[in-house]
């Protein structure tokens, strides 16, 4: 994907999370884009939260809702800024705005914003 084909907030993309350490998510996996479209386009970076199918019931998980293909939970405590152009991100789905707002609310609490 090139910067002219920009990621938008609420998109679900497949992206490579390697390299990782410890309990961080790794490999090519789905992730929710939570950063603003303009930021993504100008910088070539996007702030993303990985998605997993392994529901553990921790308070940072947000259920993926309003999608056509992707299921599971968004790991809002593992948000990360990644170069989506060089990591060849591919948009595969999107969520309803309520899901994005729920993730943003959790991150705001984590950061005490």
Image (cartoon, rainbow, N blue to C red):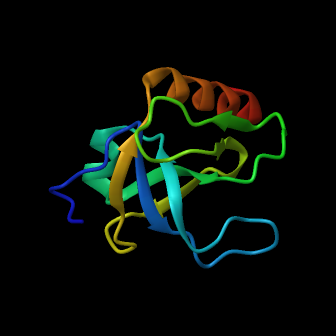
Report x, y in % for residue 52. 65, 54
* In the rendered image, the vertical position of residue 36 relative to residue 28, given as above or below: above
Does 102 sit left or right of 83 as displayed?
A: right
The C terminus lies in quadrant:
top right
Report x, y in % for residue 9. 38, 37
* In the rendered image, the vertical position of residue 81 relative to residue 100, given as above or below: below
* In the rendered image, the vertical position of residue 26 relative to residue 6, given as above or below: below
Residue at left 15%, top 56%? 4
Report x, y in % for residue 112. 74, 28
The one nearer the camera, 95 or 77, is 95
The N terminus lies in quadrant:
bottom left
Residue at left 51%, top 20%? 98
Residue furthest bottom as drawn: 19
Residue at left 82%, top 33%? 59
Residue furthest front as drawn: 69
The one nearer the camera, 68 or 39, is 68
Residue at left 53%, top 30%? 65
Does 90 sit left or right of 63 as displayed?
A: left
* In the rendered image, the vertical position of residue 17 relative to residue 66, given as above or below: below
Does 44 sit left or right of 22 as displayed?
A: left
In this figure, what is the number of numbered marks? 0
């Amino acid at each position: 994907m090139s910067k002219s084909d920009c990621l938008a907030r609420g998109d679900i993309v497949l992206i490579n999370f390697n390299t990782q350490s410890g309990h961080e998510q790794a490999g090519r996996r789905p992730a929710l884009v939570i950063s603003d479209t303009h930021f993504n386009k100008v910088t070539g970076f996007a702030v993303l939260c990985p998605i997993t199918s392994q529901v553990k019931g921790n308070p940072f998980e947000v259920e993926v809702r309003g999608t056509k293909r992707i299921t599971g939970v968004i790991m809002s405590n593992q948000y990360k800024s990644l170069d989506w152009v060089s990591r060849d991100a591919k948009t595969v789905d999107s969520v309803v705005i309520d899901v994005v707002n729920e993730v943003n609310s959790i991150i705001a609490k984590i950061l005490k914003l």
